[in-house]
Amino acid sequence: MSTCEHLVMIVEDDLDLRESIAEVLEDNQFRSLGAANGKEAIERLRADTRRPCVILLDIMMPVMDGWQFRALQREDPELGGIPVVVMSAHVDLQRATEGLAPAACLKKPVKLDALLATVQRFCREPGAGPSDASSA
């Protein structure tokens, strides 16, 4: 199904940050699905029939990091098409995300306006026509 349910997955090991992002998203009419690491995220994605319109992905996490998550996600035909936005405090974001092929990157600490603008690029209004989604 390609209908956007305004569902955003937040893969972030910092519980406070994950909850803060979820709260901001929910205050702006998005729904969120959280995971503390890549392994938990893959398991939740495979178990749920709903698909997020975008995944916000931290890179440095215990258990399974962002690189490992992306490798598994890209190999899975059901999950590979979900856009990923990497969130990182790395000084050189381009270098830090090399090989991840993210749809976008957000520098930590994440600015709320940048977060919302980025999520809105991937989560379209229900019933929005193609002309509403043209220039993101």
Image (cartoon, rainbow, N blue to C red):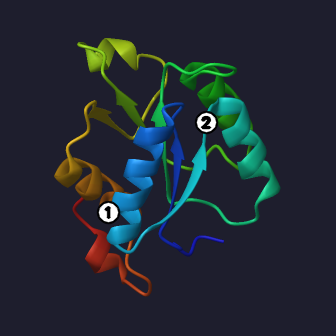
* Image mark for residue 120: 1
Quarter placement of the N terminus? bottom right
In the picture provided, is 121 more to the left or to the right than 30?
A: left
Quarter-of-image position of residue 49: bottom right
Vertical arrangement, residue 9 with respect to residue 129, above or below: above
The Cα atoms of the two marked residues, 1 and 2, are separated by 23 Å
Identity of the residue drawn at 27% across and 77% down? 132
Q: Position of residue 37 (x, y in %)?
A: 63, 31
In the picture provided, is 127 more to the left or to the right than 93?
A: right
Identity of the residue drawn at 28% across and 30% down? 108
* Residue at which label 2 appears: 36
Residue 116: tell me if it is visible.
yes
Looking at marks 1 and 2 on the same chain, the residue that comes earlier in the sequence is marked by: 2
Contact between labelled residues 2 and 1, with CB atoms less than 8 Å apart: no
| Foreground pick, 97 / 110 | 110
In the picture provided, is 92 more to the left or to the right than 104?
A: left
Q: Nearer the viewer, mark 1 or mark 2?
A: 2
Q: Amino acid at mark 1?
A: Gln
